[in-house]
Image (cartoon, grey):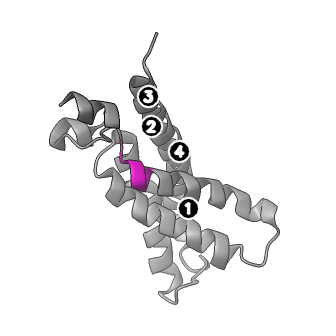
Amino acid sequence: MINREVSSQIGLLLLRVAFGLMMLVHGWQKLMGFSEMADKFPDPLGMGSQLSLISAIGAEVGCSLLLVLGLLTRFAAGPLAFTMLIAMFAIHGADPWQKKELAAAYLAVYVTLFFTGAGRFSLDHLIWGLSKVTADEEVRR
């Protein structure tokens, strides 16, 4: 039987990889449609449509790849969470909850990963030894 700590670490791995890959699909679609979207992409921050699109692609592709790898996870979760806040409140601010719900779900995951980190099964842990230390592990030291 798998102990609770290993189960938690597997859960973080699955959460990171699943949501990283799902968001990567959104970013990839934007990247592939860049020329068609560049002039009409929403610009809620006043940066211009093209720069807004580049920023969204950077978060949705670049940061999603970092999440999948578990590399710089807390750093990567920041731009992704910010992008989802913009999607939720600026892009879909006047829309019904059904339009905001997906962004809210992604936001919840990114905020969670910001606080928990990537977990043991990640490059963060492999390179820097970064992972959540439980009270049980602390007692054993």
Disc 2 to disc 3, C-alpha distance: 5 Å
Query: Disc 3 on helix, strand or loop?
Result: helix
- Tags 2 and 3 touching, CB below 8 Å: yes
Disc 4 to disc 1, C-alpha distance: 22 Å
Residue extending furthest toward the right:
96
- Among numbered discs 4 and 3, the one appearing first in the sequence: 3
- The residue singled out by tag 4 in the image is 19
Q: Amino acid at mark 2?
A: Leu
- Among numbered discs 1 and 2, the one appearing first in the sequence: 2
Closer to us: 113 or 44: 113
Specify whether 123 is left or right of 6: left
- Tags 1 and 2 touching, CB below 8 Å: no
Looking at the picture, how far across and down is residue 42, in whole percent? 61, 78
Closer to us: 116 or 24: 116
Disc 4 to disc 2, C-alpha distance: 11 Å
- The residue singled out by tag 3 in the image is 10
User: Which numbered disc, 4 or 1, marks the residue closer to the eye?
Assistant: 4
- Tags 4 and 2 touching, CB below 8 Å: no
Query: Disc 2 on helix, strand or loop?
Result: helix
Looking at the picture, how far across and down is residue 118, in whole percent? 36, 43
